[in-house]
Image (cartoon, rainbow, N blue to C red):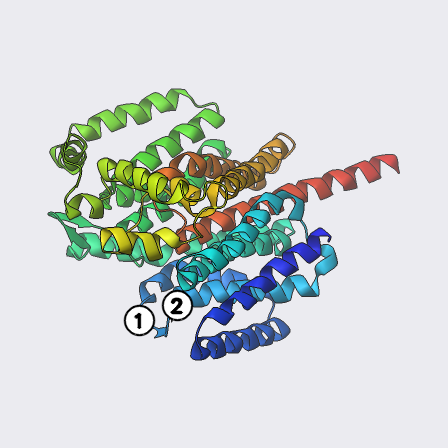
Amino acid sequence: MNNNKLIIALLLSIVISLMYLDLPTLIFVLLILGIVIFVISIFNIEGVILVITLSRATLDCLRDVFRIGPINITSFFSIFIILFGIVYFCLRMRSIKYLNIFMPILIFLGICFASIFYSPSKTGSIEEFIRIASYVTLSLLIANVFNTKEKIKRFIKYYFGSLIIPLAVGFYQYFMKSGLSYYGYNRLYATLQHPSSYVKYLNIFLIICSVFMIMSNKTNKSKKWCYCLFIILLFQIFATFTRAGWIEAVIGLCLIFWFTRRRSLIIAVLAGVVILFSLPFVKERFSSEIKYFHTNTIELPAEAYLQGSIKSRFQFNEFLFKKMFIKSPLSGTGIGSFYYYYAPEYFGIQIESHGDLTKLLGEVGIIGTMLFIFGMARIGYFIFIKLKYVKDYLLYNIMLSAVCLIILRIFIQNFDAELRLVLVQWYYWSLYGIALACSHIYGEEEAKENISRNC
């Protein structure tokens, strides 16, 4: 079976998995399929992706407003993009690129799909599988559709355009004190569902913006806008009062400064961290971590779990190892089984483990987890080795941003619930896809230069 047939079989398996859902949901999915085919036959696929990229962050606030059975607007987008991908790849089976780069991730998806059949919560596992499959499908779509410099520039404009409304709503929440009230903090979440999601979304753009600031020419007019956006992003990241988000921003900036050979700026970042930690309300925000970490009792209060304290993360990891991983070290207990089965069974509520790699180890075993890590590293390495050949300012910056984000994700992924943050993952994988498209443009340009030299 060649690569093209493999991806088609994988994507079609998603439709088969929907047979576990009830009849109204199946009718709704078929209706979506009809809309997808209609949209593709009339509109340009590039325009559809651009509209989704622009509006996705804003529409996240409507996640629980429009709901048909188990399908909300987030599920709609996931199913829509998967079915969109099925139709697109079926029409272009012979011209799909990057399948060899995505092969470990595709095999990981296959393992996730197989785990549905032995999962204790099949419906929950299907939902989790569809969620992860939508990220990969979106990334492959973007990498194949946006295959010229003009298209990539247009995509980046829409990508950054998605910030406009969330940032405006974030400032409104700050000045009107209408954010998430949490132990006296006014935590910004903008149009997203939670400050944790919002800060990760902002960190993506903080890293990209940092690269553009450092690597741009002094005469570049857009540089001043990068500085303005950088300051706005830093302010709103701080105003989310999310500890993991703060730490992620610091590590991300240090990575950027290391790769761009501005290592003296790392000292400036660390000095800024020291100054911030001297502020009373920042100390207070981290005080619960110290309190729970030194707790000697086996059972933590529910407050510690809901706050995602370090102590609770250790306890979740211990639970995942003893109750799930030991049962089936190689294949796991089924994708999504922790959130939909084990957490309600043992903790009484659907709660996140705040550690995706450990959770994957329990749900898809050693094989699936290693494939996921290797797949992420393979995409990052492929983009990285192309960097030294790329001379175009825009392409280089996008590719470097993607490499830094992939490294950050691999190391940070086990300290938060990353894979369930659908909107954030969409923007991660969108960037990976457009970075791969940038590397392909380099390859085409190099081939043209070689042909012209030979002539």
Seen at 35% across and 73% down, the residue is 67
Q: Seen from this angle, which residue lies furthest front?
A: 327
Residue type for callout 2: Ile
Label placed on residue 202: none
Crowding around mark 2 (Cα neighbors within 10 Å: few <14, some 14 to 19, many 20+) is: some
Where residue 348 sits, quadrant-wise, is bottom left
Seen at 48% across and 23% down, the residue is 261
Seen at 59% across and 48% down, the residue is 107
Q: Seen from this angle, which residue lies furthest right?
A: 455
Expressed as whole percent of the image width and height from the top left, the position of residue 302 reads 16, 48
Q: Judge left or right: residue 72 versus residue 394.
A: left
Depth check, front residue: 234 or 201: 201
Q: Which residue is mark 1?
A: 65
Q: Which residue is mark 2?
A: 73
Q: Judge left or right: residue 7 versus residue 402.
A: right
Q: Judge left or right: residue 236 versus residue 122.
A: left
Expressed as whole percent of the image width and height from the top left, the position of residue 10 reads 60, 58
Residue 108 visible: yes
Expressed as whole percent of the image width and height from the top left, the position of residue 18 reads 50, 68
Residue 227 visible: no
Crowding around mark 1 (Cα neighbors within 10 Å: few <14, some 14 to 19, many 20+) is: few
Expressed as whole percent of the image width and height from the top left, the position of residue 71 reads 40, 70
Depth check, front residue: 441 or 100: 100
Seen at 37% across and 38% down, the residue is 414
Where residue 266 sits, quadrant-wise, is top left
- Helix or strand or loop: what does disc 1 sit on? loop
Asked whether the beta carbons under mark 1 and mark 2 sit within 8 Å of each other, the answer is yes
Q: Disc 1 versus disc 2: distance between alpha carbons? A: 8 Å
Depth check, front residue: 56 or 309: 309
Q: Judge left or right: residue 438 versus residue 335.
A: right
